[in-house]
Amino acid sequence: MIRVENLLKSFGDRVVLRNISALFESGKTNLIIGKSGSGKTVFLKSIVGLLDIDQGEIWYGDILFSKLNFTDKKEIRKEMGMLFQGSALFDSLTVEENVRFPLDMFTKQSYEEKLERVNFCLARVNLVNSNDLYPSELSGGMKKRVAIARAIALNPTYLFCDEPNSGLDPKTAIVIDALIKEITEEYNITTIVNTHDMNSVMENGEKIIFIDEGEKCWEGTKSDVLESDNEKLNDFVFANSLARKLKENK
Amino acid sequence: MLKFLHAFGTYCLLLKKVFSRPEKASVYYKQTIKELMNLGIRSVGIVIIISFFMGAVITLQTAYNTENPIYPTYLIGLGCRDSVLLEFSSTIIALILAGKVGSSIASEIGTMRVTEQIDALELMGVNSASYLILPKIIATLVFNPFLTLISIAVGIFGGWIAGTSAGVISSQDYIYGIQYAFIPYYVTYAIIKTLFFAFTIASVSAFQGYRVEGGALEVGRASTKAVVYSSIVILTLNVILTQLLLS
């Protein structure tokens, strides 16, 4: 479980996030939605500690993560996995080496044990016989799968996904969404997904937080979205005429 | 001035992070071997080519500028040896490596920054500065002295080939000249300078790459800055070290 309280983040004079509080439960796919530039990525990077926050608190279970020093944060980070927007695979390493990287860094397993785990993770994301390929040889969807495999290599307690569907066709996007949901439920992970993809919202939205111009505007589930009379949320979710008609007809 | 002090402070903080305790020595060892190959072995070719022609030109220029019967011809060999030893094989090769190795380090780390690979390392709990920069610093510190020694040998050899081929000096005189009044400390001096230059190239370039913000354009700019700033620091250090070591 992750709890955020009154988070404030600014860059110079520009306040990007204003007093955001939220609770992200384990075993659920928690979605953060909002327009491009609304502060979603800054929010996610603040939660994982890649950006220092100006005010507020971030709790991982009973641990006040935002007040930990670099060394103590490292311990919590070993329990995190993250899927970055551009996958962030290491270009100079093969698929196998990418997935093995956290195991090499933080475990004392033998090569055979690590290889077994790598193959398990790659099989889990439906990517077999790709061990020796380099990231430059992979498609966008394959890169995302490798990034998920790397993120789950150490059995994380927390999984963060920043725009997992960006640059993917709708069908592949649904496959990636389903994979994230399955993994979350299977390993009881606390998953936070940043997205502006409406298919994701309607498929995976067990808990949704809507951010607009750095403020939390709405919170609920995917079924609540259909019922909501929040104008900003409706403008965002039902942006096109077809979606508006569907909402009117429910 | 304030901008410079801020940058220098950030550079020092980065170095502190770089030299903190590595997460896993075996991973760092493998990474260092990789960097020895990338930054060291792959620079041997260019060092040999440049040193050969550098030695050749020094010999020919010395010969044409000392065309006087009162100067013994073996001084051409001596001039080539001392020029190569004292200045060219350490400083000029360092400037060339600042271009080749420095830009490569800055663009590699800069690209990793803009494609969030550094964020991925940090998120895993890896000290990204140490993991990415320390092996490069060690690799250049270990290998650049060998490059300097190779450069010295090839430069003097190039001088011999050019001098004898052009007929400006006999082989016997050249060999006598490169042995005449030899001061072994000059080799030590060249190696000491090389170590300082190697550290400068790796750390300044890595610093430029590590602090990139933006996209491809900024990576390109960081790469250029890495070469320019490394070169300026190398030239400044050259003056300081020469005064300290030879006075």
Image (cartoon, coloured by chain):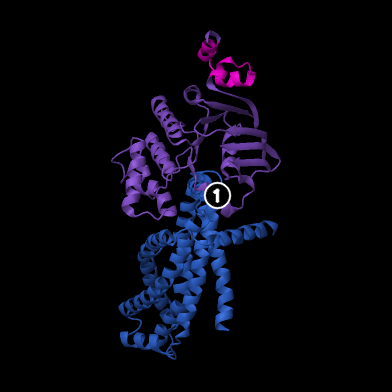
Chain holding disc 1: B
Magenta stretch secondary structure, dominant: helix
The residue range painted magenta reads A223-247
- Residue A211: name its quadrant: top right
Residue A27 lies, in percent from the top left, at: 49, 33
Asked whether, in this view, residue B80 is left or right of residue B119, the answer is left
Vertical order, B173 against A99 (above or below): below
**Display colour for chain B:** blue
Q: Residue furthest top?
A: A249
Asked whether, in this view, residue A8 is left or right of residue B113, the answer is right
In percent of the image, x 55 and y 9: which residue is there?
A248
Q: Residue furthest left?
A: A129
> Label 1 neighbourhood size at 10 Å, few (<14), some (14-19), many (20+)?
many
Could you tell me the amino acid type at mark 1? Val
Residue B127 lies, in percent from the top left, at: 52, 55
Residue A225 located within the stretch drawn in magenta: yes
Q: Does residue B30 appear anywhere in the picture?
A: yes
**Display colour for chain A:** purple
- Reading the image, the residue beneath label 1 is B212
Residue A216 lies, in percent from the top left, at: 64, 29
Q: Does residue A238 appear anywhere in the picture?
A: no
In percent of the image, x 56 and y 52: which residue is there?
B211
Q: Quadrant of the N terminus of chain A?
A: top right
Closer to us: A61 or B79: A61
In percent of the image, x 45 and y 56: which residue is there?
B104
Closer to us: A39 or A32: A32
**Label 1 secondary element:** loop
Vertical order, A152 against B51 (above or below): above
Residue B169 located within the stretch drawn in magenta: no
